[in-house]
Amino acid sequence: MTPPVVLVHGFATSAARTWGDNGWLDILADVGREVLAPDLLGHATAERPTDPEAYDALEAHLLERLPAEPVDAVGFSLGARTLLLLASAHPERFHSLVVAGVGANLFRDDGSSEMIAAAIEGRAPADDPVARYFATLAEAPDQEPAALAALMRRPRSQPLTDEGLARITCPVLVVLGDQDFAGPADPLLERLATARLVSLRGVDHFATPKNFGFIDAVLEFLEAGG
């Protein structure tokens, strides 16, 4: 039986904007796939607490919304990181994984979380276009800026470890634009024994979800069974 496809959006957006507006829900329905597209804790239709400690439950909140059977899962940015953490802890819940918009950024602590939180609160650094872009996303009608800032300040963000990533044995597709600040992909590929890379030429982080190269790569990966 073909597993459901779970789509997990990135920070300061939503399932409707990332996957609905960019055509993913219709495309996957057209090829006969059952799709689940939950909103992450702190976003859109999900609960939106403003206490940073509430986001210790970010990964658990998503896990509760997954079916009991293994799924094919596609995540972008924060959604990709969250899926990697869940697959590290519960590899049996995943038939295959696609993680996009992540790479070396997963293993560096550059203070960007606080910078993004400050930008959302109206203190965007003049020289940081990424923080300013996230601040713009947070102004959307379906978002709560105070909740998003709290998520960025979660006190106990789970780290991705080499040991955890080694537990992921399902097929993994890493998709990364060659203009994406999250790159390069090499540090992630080196830690995932079953991963391969699709590089999107001329694509930056924020253009990734609507890029046809990303959509085509995922459809091909799913059609092949991961």
Image (cartoon, rainbow, N blue to C red):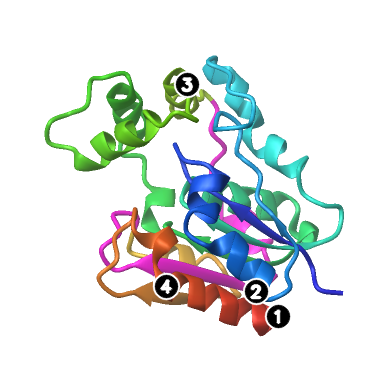
Q: For mark 1, what is the residue?
A: 225
Q: Which portion, as a residue range, is magenta?
A: 156-182
Amino acid identity at mark 1: Gly
Task: Note whether 69 is above or below 16 in the view shown.
Answer: below
| Residue 124 visible in rendering | yes
* Residue at 41% in and 62% down: 210
Residue shown at the point (37%, 46%) measured from the top left: 108
Question: What amino acid is labelled 3 in the image?
Answer: Ala
Q: Secondary structure at mark 3?
A: helix
Q: Kindly identify which residue carries mark 2.
A: 171
- Residue on which disc 4 sits: 212
Q: Amino acid at mark 2?
A: Pro
CA distance separating discs 1 and 3: 38 Å
SS for dot 4:
helix
Work out whether residue 19 or residue 26 is closer to the camera in this orientation and state it.
Answer: 26
Write down the residue under mark 3: 150
